[in-house]
Amino acid sequence: MRTTMSLIVVTVLLAAGCATTVASEDVAATPSTTIAATTSKAIPVTSQPSPTTTTVAPADPEEGLNSPFRIEPNDTNPIIEKPTDQGGAMLPSVVVSDGVIHMWFTQTTDWMAVPTAIFHATSDDGLAWTVDPEPVLTGDGEGFDAFSVAEGTVVNMGDRWIMYYNARAVPGPGPGPSIGRAVAEGPGGPWVTDPEPVLTVGDPGSWDSGFVSPNAALATEDGIMLFYSGGANYIELEPTATGLAMSVDSTQFTKSSEPVLSGSATWDERFSWEAAVFEYDGGYGAFYTGDPETLTGETIGYAWSADGVNWASATDNPLLKPRTQAWASLDVVAGSVIKTPDGRWLLFYSGNVNMLDFSIGVAELVPAD
């Protein structure tokens, strides 16, 4: 079992900054121009989106599901390294646009003293990356995201780009209680934030009453499907799960009342979160992060759903474990899946050696034998 200090690693996994020694009014932040959220009637979560990607017919979950992919980490990993010994880079969201691969990721130079911010990088092949020198989104200095931001999850809407992000108003450990929205005309920004969150924690006693953080945002003909990680009390290591919220206008969301993906086997019975959801096989695939009751290290497995609501986990999970590569010997955490312009499927993920030294790696998803 992990030591108490090792548990801090996962506590800040979604952290919007755990710099408890820094008062929020003393944090240097880049204020953002705000825009008013529009109002629209939200669709129920039972609405069925229509994926545009169709390949072969998926396996029948009743007969057991095997992953259609093997995960093969690249030898050049990590592709984005921690910026300092006290800091880390993690939680990548990746989108392909006009032949360019874009990544947004969470970074800090010191987990205990510097609030996290969201950075942007570009690549031609998914292996070699150019990182913008300054963050594209930081704590707003006031309101629900005053202190820090993390886990920027981006979707391309054609005429605009939308980023959903975890937000924290004050210093503290673990992920924040809100999800914000920012809009830009292009992937590099500038990003204009909404004045209020688009999603917050549930009522006391609900499964997501402690924190909410975005994992994947998918545009469908019915609106936005937003998959998010949540839990009741992460500091006390309560179970985590993956939820779903839907919106017709990208701002007003309706949550599913219960998690759509939660622990179902030994490897993911305590944590079942950080889901990299993507359109696949006439429905949705997801590489997600699990940890057992013994908290012996986060691993990555696969699940499939026809509608984004009802999921079947692969019987051959987990597919990627720590210690596969030296830079990710403690945990591996799913981030984002893309299909490159040359037809490769890539999984981007985070990994660490000890404590908080997260870096970002990439793996090719190759057809299973």
Image (tube, grey):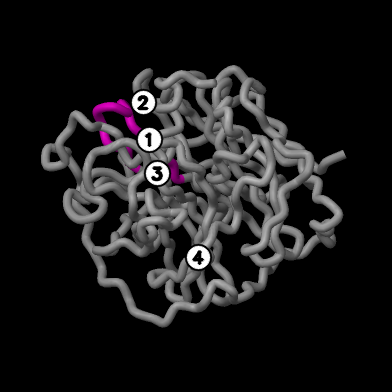
Whether 276 is drawn above or below 244: the answer is: above
Rounded to the nearest angstrom, the CA distance separating label 3 from label 1 is: 24 Å
Left or right: 63 as drawn, with respect to 205: right
- Which one is nearer the viewer's eye here, 369 or 80? 369
- First-in-chain label (3 vs 1): 1
Residue at figure coordinates x 50%, y 69% from the top left: 246
Tell me residue 48's x, y (percent). Answer: 63, 74
Whether 152 is drawn above or below 58: the answer is: above
Rounded to the nearest angstrom, the CA distance separating label 2 from label 4 is: 36 Å
Pointer 1 residue? 107
- First-in-chain label (2 vs 1): 2
Which of label 2 and label 3 is nearer to you?
Answer: 3
Rounded to the nearest angstrom, the CA distance separating label 4 from label 3 is: 17 Å
The reply to whether dot 3 and dot 1 touch (C-beta < 8 Å) is no
- First-in-chain label (4 vs 3): 3
- Which one is nearer the viewer's eye here, 205 or 78? 205
Rounded to the nearest angstrom, the CA distance separating label 2 from label 1 is: 7 Å
Pointer 4 residue? 257
Which of label 2 and label 4 is nearer to you?
Answer: 4
Residue 69's quadrant in the figure?
top right
Residue type for callout 2 = Gly
Pointer 2 residue? 87
Q: What is the span of residues highlighted in magenta in the rendered image?
A: 104-117
- First-in-chain label (4 vs 1): 1
The reply to whether dot 2 and dot 1 touch (C-beta < 8 Å) is yes
Pointer 3 residue? 233
Q: Based on the picture, tell me whether residue 115 belongs to the magenta stretch.
A: yes
Residue at figure coordinates x 50%, y 36% from the top left: 129
